[in-house]
Every structure is written in structure tokens, then in C-alpha cells.
Image (tube, rainbow, N blue to C red):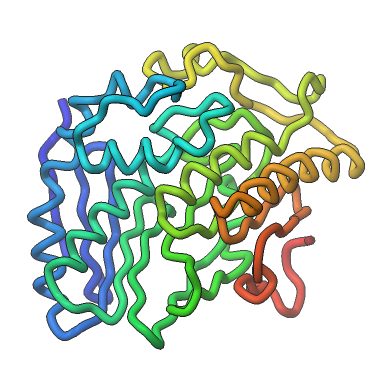
């Protein structure tokens, strides 16, 4: 049985909220940060129960019509994945980002803030007043966490959300990317796009890739019988480049449709960027060397 929601203040005057699988770290600057934190605490207890009430619909693949959802977070999830309905995707692809967006909206509605963020396991929703900037660390390999780059987002940018997906992260992946970080207008949109771009970084049918049906690993997975990546053997440099090229193609298609602002893709020390102004927003955390690019 899931315990009830908890709240605590962390170092640096950050708010930590936890309820079952939802784990948030929240920060803000403004004249009344306490009011923003109070609004977050008031909004949080309803998030998980409302999602659970519609879980069967949220785990179903998107069809030709929008799913009949009533909860505000569930509606955010469906709206974020709706433009991608031509491929297999469920609203669960945007759950972390949508929760972050909803919590941020409650804080911003409560008081004037210069800056605020809601970090849901690495998927981040942002509020930036004019003249403000937010720096977010980018991790190239979830299995060996380290800051490999910094995404610098200022108020003039359309980016208000970022998310990372890939093999070895919190969720299953159909692809082989170590990580795909996406910058988008909302955290939910970034979450959905990162999931699908990470799926696209792949070499279908390659014998070095071990896959198992998602249901065998988690009976409740929204991916059902789809084969998810569980291990990756040796690949040549050409094969790594080919897999990344597939992901870049997906990212560029999303960028062309206005669904993302930029994407950063990594696979075994190799990286690619796609999107508008990405080189200006992403800066290496290893100016004197470090992980091979």
C-alpha cells in the first residue's frame, strides 16, 4: 500500500514532495516563496489518486480520437502525446513532465515569482520572469550519472521544460540510447518527445541487442508485449553512428513540426545535437577534456 504524501525542506530552501512513485524537488525565487511552497503542498496530495483513477486509459495506446480523460494532469499527458499518435505511444510517456507542469502552474498562480522549477526525477518544468536564466545539468549516461553538459535557458527562449529518456533510466526504452535530453515548451512535451527519440536511436534486429517483452519485466507496463532493450553488446563505430542518425532524424522531424526546440542524443560516448540554437544552449561541462564526444 502506498503511504501518504510527505513534504520536507531541503538544503538551499528547496521543497521535497514525495507520494509513491512521484518524487519532486522544487525551487523558487521571489517575494513570497513560502506562498509558492504552500500552494505546491496544497496541490500535491490529489495528484497521484487522480492519476490512478484513470490509469487504465492512460496506459492505452493513443488512437484516432483523444482519450476520455478528466484529471488535469491526465489531460496534460494526453495533449503532449497526441501529436505523436502516428506511432505507438501512450499518455504515460509524458507523466513525469505533466506532473511537473501541473505543480509549477499551482505555484505560479499563487504568487509572483522571478524563477521557479519543479524537478520530477530529471524532468523539469520552468518558470522564468524577464531577465531570468536557469542552468540545468545534462547527464549523458543514466547508468553512470555525471554532469556532461549544461543547458542554459533564459527567459527569452521558448523553452519551459526539459526531459531525459533512454536505456537505463526510470522507464523502459525500445531503443539503445544512453540518454536523450529534449528542450521544449513544456515539461510534458519534452517528456513525450525524449521517450520517442530515445526509442528511435536503434538498430532493429541487431544480434547485439537483447530485448524482452515489457510485460515480462513489469506486468503493469503500458508497453505490454513490446520488446524493450535489456542489454547491449559490442557495436562498431559505424553502427553507433547509424543508430544515432535514426534518432536525429526523429528529432529533426519533431523540430520541423514545432514539437521541440532542441535535442541532445548520446550513445556510448558519441553525441549528436538537433534543433534550433542547441549549440548556444548546451555547453560542455568538461572544457579541458572528460568524456569522449
* Side of 82 relative to 12 (left or right): right
* Residue at left offset 85%, top offset 35%: 235
How many numbered tags mark residues here?
0
**Nearer to the camera, 171 or 152:** 152
Measured as percent of width and height from the top left, residue 189 is found at 45, 49
* Side of 233 relative to 40 (left or right): right
* Side of 54 relative to 120 (left or right): left
The quarter of the image holding the N terminus is top left
Measured as percent of width and height from the top left, residue 134 is found at 44, 76
**Nearer to the camera, 7 or 48:** 48
- Above-or-below relation of 290 to 55: below
* Residue at left offset 30%, top offset 71%: 116
Measured as percent of width and height from the top left, residue 228 is found at 59, 23
**Nearer to the camera, 230 or 156:** 156
Measured as percent of width and height from the top left, residue 94 is found at 41, 40
**Extreme-front residue of the structure:** 65
- Above-or-below relation of 49 to 217: below
Quarter of the image where one finds residue 175? top right
* Residue at left offset 23%, top offset 25%: 54
The quarter of the image holding the C terminus is bottom right
* Residue at left offset 62%, top offset 47%: 254
- Above-or-below relation of 292 to 89: below
Amino acid at each position: 500500500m502506498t503511504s501518504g504524501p510527505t513534504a520536507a525542506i531541503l538544503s538551499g530552501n528547496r521543497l521535497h514532495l514525495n507520494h509513491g512513485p512521484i518524487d519532486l524537488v522544487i525551487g523558487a525565487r521571489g517575494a513570497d516563496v513560502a506562498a509558492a511552497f504552500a500552494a505546491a503542498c496544497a496541490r500535491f496530495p490529489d495528484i497521484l489518486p487522480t492519476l490512478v483513477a484513470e490509469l487504465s486509459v492512460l496506459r492505452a495506446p493513443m488512437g484516432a480520437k483523444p482519450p476520455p480523460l478528466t484529471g488535469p494532469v491526465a489531460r496534460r499527458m494526453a495533449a503532449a502525446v497526441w501529436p505523436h499518435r502516428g506511432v505507438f505511444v501512450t499518455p504515460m510517456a509524458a507523466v513525469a513532465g505533466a506532473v511537473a507542469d501541473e505543480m509549477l502552474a499551482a505555484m505560479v498562480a499563487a504568487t509572483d515569482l522571478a524563477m521557479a522549477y519543479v524537478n520530477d526525477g530529471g524532468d523539469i518544468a520552468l518558470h522564468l520572469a524577464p531577465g531570468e536564466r536557469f542552468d540545468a545539468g545534462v547527464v549523458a549516461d543514466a547508468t553512470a550519472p555525471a554532469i556532461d553538459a549544461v543547458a542554459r535557458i533564459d527567459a527569452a527562449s521558448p523553452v519551459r521544460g526539459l526531459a531525459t529518456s533512454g536505456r537505463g533510466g526510470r522507464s523502459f526504452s525500445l531503443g539503445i540510447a544512453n540518454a536523450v535530453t529534449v528542450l521544449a515548451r513544456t515539461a510534458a512535451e519534452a517528456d513525450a518527445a525524449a521517450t520517442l527519440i530515445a526509442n528511435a536511436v536503434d538498430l532493429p534486429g541487431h544480434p547485439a541487442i537483447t530485448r524482452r517483452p515489457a510485460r515480462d519485466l513489469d506486468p503493469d507496463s503500458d508497453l505490454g508485449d513490446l520488446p524493450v532493450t535489456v542489454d547491449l553488446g559490442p557495436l562498431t563505430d559505424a553502427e553507433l553512428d547509424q543508430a544515432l542518425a535514426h534518432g536525429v532524424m526523429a528529432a529533426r522531424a519533431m523540430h520541423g513540426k514545432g514539437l521541440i526546440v532542441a535535442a541532445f542524443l548520446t550513445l556510448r560516448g558519441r553525441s549528436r545535437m538537433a534543433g534550433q540554437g542547441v549549440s548556444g544552449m548546451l555547453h560542455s561541462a568538461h572544457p579541458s577534456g572528460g568524456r569522449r564526444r
